[in-house]
Image (tube, grey):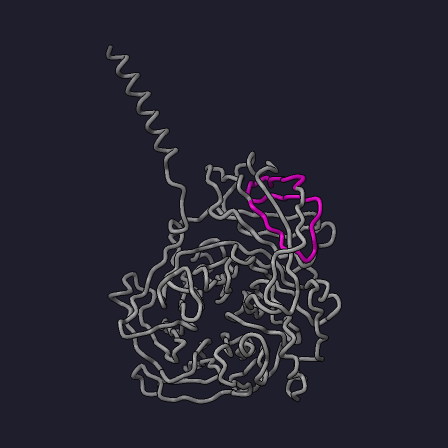
Amino acid sequence: MKNTLLLSSIFTGLFLASFSKAADPIPTEDDYYKIVKFEIPKDVVLEAGAIELTADNKLFVSSRRGEIWSIENPFAKDLAKDAKWTRYAHGLHEVLGLASKDGWIYATQRGELTKLKDSNGDGKADIFQTVCNAWEIDGDYHEYAFGSKFDKDGNIWIVLCLTGSFTSNSKYRGWCVRVNADGTFTPTCSGIRSPGSIGFNAAGDCFYTDNQGPWNGTCSLKHLLPGSFQGHPDGNKWFDQASAKLAGPKPETPKSGSRMMIEAERIPQLMPPAIYFPYKKMGQSASGIDFDKSEGKFGPFQNQLFVADQTNSTIMRVHLEKVHGRYQGACFPFRKGFGSGNVPVMASKNGHLFVGGTNRGWGSQGNKPFALERLDWTGKVPFEIHEMHAKNDGFELTFTHPVDSKTAADIASYKMSTYCYIYQSSYGSPEVDFTYPKITSAVVAPDNKSVRIVIDKPVAGHIHDLVVAGVRSKEGLPLLHNEAYYTLNYIPEAGK
């Protein structure tokens, strides 16, 4: 009887242990990256437009309402208790760019680049100087100006939104310009429509996000190569300005109803988007840009770009590579659940991502009118597609954890479709020209950290929409995010 009871107890224990293991919750984004909220003072309307972290670890945050706030102790565990807020400046015009240099704060306003300084040490700016105001505004609500940090040559890059986001009624609207700290003004690229932010990758190349609308089938990330044409032709009227000659010859007008890569072959200056963000799948209003510069303190995504979306209140992740000398690559979901509509982001070297939000003018999944938050890595590495590389006959996927070789080698674990957008003067575009490549093989590397998938027909100029639902890690976990969207503008040469 005792033996029977003992065996019964053992079997019961094994069953419960097995049930408990099976019932363990699948990890979520919050297990890997925590959203820490700043407590914004009650009398502050912080519709965040830009973020800067100075050398003394003060966080500067600008507001669409023309204020700049400085925050001491932005890395504190208890932000409500330890973060100290001071209004550094006010009376400015919708600051959507902040940078710091030699004790000055540089603020990109709608109509000018301004530098500010606190000369007496009371925490408030008392010197305001115009650096450059060589572009124009006519009072239209949509004539935003987004400014970058300083590049290696001492320039701030500024993207100037079109009038009403459709036409260029003011000088240099629809352009990217560069302004040196000494005020030198350099028109750099035409073809801008409605930017959501501007920033650099780890190599120091400049990118901006543009949003769905005329000549933009969906939101995208574009490389601002000097002399390039970014796709919207209305601002090209300013090529008659003497200073515009610095941007090279005026590009031809695209043919409405065509496709981006067809027009890129015809118009040498036309720069195809490096990344398309498929509409709704990856958001509806791409915004802030920064790259992980933490050398591992923010997890396994060193040097990759993080891009915000205002409507979906999310952060997306981007891996870029160069094919035929041009940037292209894949975007992945990363983190959702922010309090308001994400606009500026800034990554710190010690492993935090600061995110500012506002939903005035556009609704957002985060229902607060404004927010300031910090994204912290918990130290746990999620099971994710780490990188997606284009090959002549398919793609190579790398992973953050070793994969289970059986599921990773099973072609049924993968599903792919491709599509593109109509390049047209009317607003946006549906997904068109669908193809459904057949995945013919999936070869797992000996270290189980990458998989080479071969498809029967890659399509140049198409987004390759990949769902990796079946792959498991060696520990049996599914991918935290199993979607990847690769913008295949160019197919690598055979053998690459």
Residue 493 percent location from the top left of the image? 73, 54
Q: Is residue 324 above or below residue 411?
A: below
Residue 297 percent location from the top left of the image? 42, 57
Residue at the location (49% across, 37% down)? 474
Residue at the location (50% across, 64% down)? 285
Left or right? Give the position of 317 relative to 40.
right
Is 465 part of what is drawn in magenta?
yes
Nearest the eye: 202 or 461: 461
Nearest the eye: 77 or 395: 395
Q: Is residue 198 above or below residue 241?
A: above
Left or right? Give the position of 480 relative to 166.
left
Residue 429 image-quadrant placement: bottom right
Q: Which residues are magenta?
A: 439-467
Question: Which residue, as the protein is rendered here, is positioned at the far front?
Answer: 426
Residue at the location (52% across, 59% down)? 304
Number of numbered labels in the structure image: 0
Residue 177 percent location from the top left of the image? 58, 80
Q: Main secondary structure of the magenta part?
A: strand
Is 39 part of what is drawn in magenta?
no
Residue 454 seen: yes
Residue 158 seen: no
**Which of the image's four quarters has the N terminus?**
top left
Residue at the location (64% across, 84% down)? 238
Residue 383 percent location from the top left of the image? 47, 46
Question: Which residue, as the protein is rendered here, is positioned at the far top?
Answer: 1
Residue 70 image-quadrant placement: bottom left
